[in-house]
Amino acid sequence: MEHNDITKGKPLDFIRQIVADDLQSGKHIQPVTRFPPEPNGFLHIGHAKSICLNFGIAEEYKSRCHLRFDDTNPSKEEDLYVEAIKEDVAWLGYDWQDNLFFASDYFDDLYQYALQLIRAGKAYVCELSAEQIRLYRGTLKEPGRNSPYRNRGIDENLELFEKMKNGDFAEGSHVLRAKIDMASPNLNLRDPVIYRIMKVSHHRTGDTWCIYPMYDYTHSISDSIEKITHSLCTLEFEDHRPLYDWVLNTLQTQCHPRQIEFARLNLSYTVMSKRKLLKLVEEKFVDGWDDPRMLTITGLRRRGYTPASIRSFCHTIGVGKKESWIDMGVLENAIREDLNDTAPRVMGVLDPLKVIIDNYPEGQEEEVEAKNHPQKPEMGGRTLPFSRELFIERSDFLEDPPRKYFRLGPDREVRLRYGYYIKFASIEKDEETGEITAIHCTYDPLTKGGSSPDGRKVKGTIHWVSAHHCIDCRVRLYDRLFSVENPDADKETTFLDHLNPDSVVELENCKVEPGLNQQESGMRFQFERQGYFCLDHKDSRPGKPVFNRIVTLRDSWTKKQ
């Protein structure tokens, strides 16, 4: 599916309507957007919404979207995160072409703009501590108080700012603040800090700088330098928009982008905070950023989600102005719908029970024809080996089945998928434990392919693999990481108290059809009657595949509650 096909013919969301109106009025020739992540962690599904929005608009107008890293806090940033973010955006199917930028590209410009603010009497060096600045700022009900350093002269501020830049002061001892309005009802306009001292090596600029600009100041100027037309961000930045505009108006920049806020993604049964995701990783509640239970893009990729499914999900939830919660089932349905069309069908037995066909000739083997997709003949077929000994799911046999149990049991006949009709004959059990170790059946050699020439019908069809040809593998059954819809809702507990103890179940002795031993890692399949699975690219080894369950065939979570 082409990206543009997702939105083609659909009503415009409010942001796209603004863009369309701006183009129609002649305000802009074409839109220019940007996706500006901080390189201090891995991207998650919430970032995917912003990626799809910003790059999607650029694609729709054959324009450009910049990938710009907001790397102004060197204490938390790494090249590792830069490369991971680039990989995630590209994997989602988006291309920034030559438009890769870093806020650190503009450190010289940002410094010169700060000098311009000082010379205009719009910024000053302050020696209050961070705690004092917070106390002086006031509250929503009480105005702030002026810093005792607010009325310093321009020359003194220039000299002090130069000393800050040269490393003459300790961290936390001096900051540069914008001089706006300490009585403003918007706390963001009460002389916000725009530069602080950080004697930390930067991942790109090394030790060239020991002062670093703050986000609101940096972001507005970076947008202006890059001639962004529509600066799209989530609702928590709505109160920051007056500061964004103040910086650009005060500096009288040639380009003044329009900041527009939209509702962030709130998804049930997960957390979206980078800080909390980092805690899960660092304290080993999960096996890294790419753990398939994590809603990071790298985790979703390893789980087996497709770029198309995530783009479809982002389109389905839309872009709005009001905060709302999206049920995890919407995301799960997006991957089901994608894989239902694209994933080849195969057979895998997760809890194997041996079946011996007593009347099948010993040593004989044959092949049966199987379809790769029952509704898509263009996907072709494959041959499966059939022999006297098979494996079926243990749950497909009961010694004392209820009346409406249509699988194998005493006096029951079932169809082997693509194979023969088989009928129960006898059973083998472990003498000590009483566990069933094998069942014996007979087969009807006239029913090859799954139909009977005498017209008799069977109600049950079960999957199987040949015991002499199947591949041993491990299978991980992944489920939601948290057991409650909103892990942060209960103030008496923390999100860690709601981790789902069954979020992953690992099965060691699974069997799959032999063709899966030659598949490339990352390949996705439907294990018939089991769900959708992906060959794990990290832990699979030649001859020792590991499969991750992407999602069940149907939404079983609601039934479990």
Image (spheres, grey):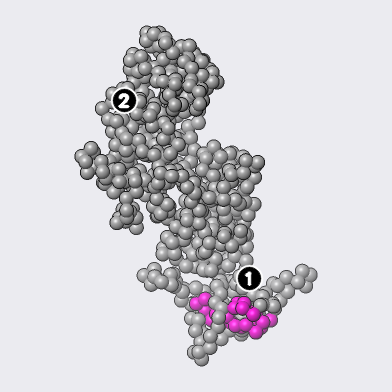
Q: Report the residue at 48% width, 35% height from top.
A: 40
| Displayed quadrant of residue 7 | bottom left
Q: How many marks?
A: 2
Place of residue 435 in the rendered image (x, y in percent of width and height, measured from the top left): 73, 70
Vertically, is 382 above or below 172?
Answer: below
Q: Which residue is mark 1?
A: 395
Q: Amino acid at mark 1?
A: Ser
Provide residue 360's location: percent of width, then percent of height. 59, 83
- Residue beneath disc 2: 249
From the image, which quarter does the N terminus lie in?
bottom left
* Position above or below: 257 against 168: below
Does 411 lie within the magenta span? yes
Dot 2 falls on a residue whose secondary structure is: helix
Task: State which region is magenta.
Answer: 403-426
Q: Is residue 404 above or below residue 145?
A: below
Of circles 2 and 1, which is in front? Answer: 2
| Disc 2 crowd, CA 10 A, few/some/many (<14, 14-19, 20+) | few
Say which residue appears at 33% left-offset and 15% top-offset.
120
User: 249 left or right of 356?
Assistant: left
Magenta-colored stretch includes residue 422: yes
The residue furthest bottom is: 454
Q: Residue at x 78, y 72 (%)?
A: 431
CA–CA distance in space, label 2 to label 1: 70 Å
In the image, is 267 to the left or to the right of 218?
right
Whether residue 185 can be seen here: yes
Q: Earlier in the sequence, mark 2 or mark 1?
A: 2
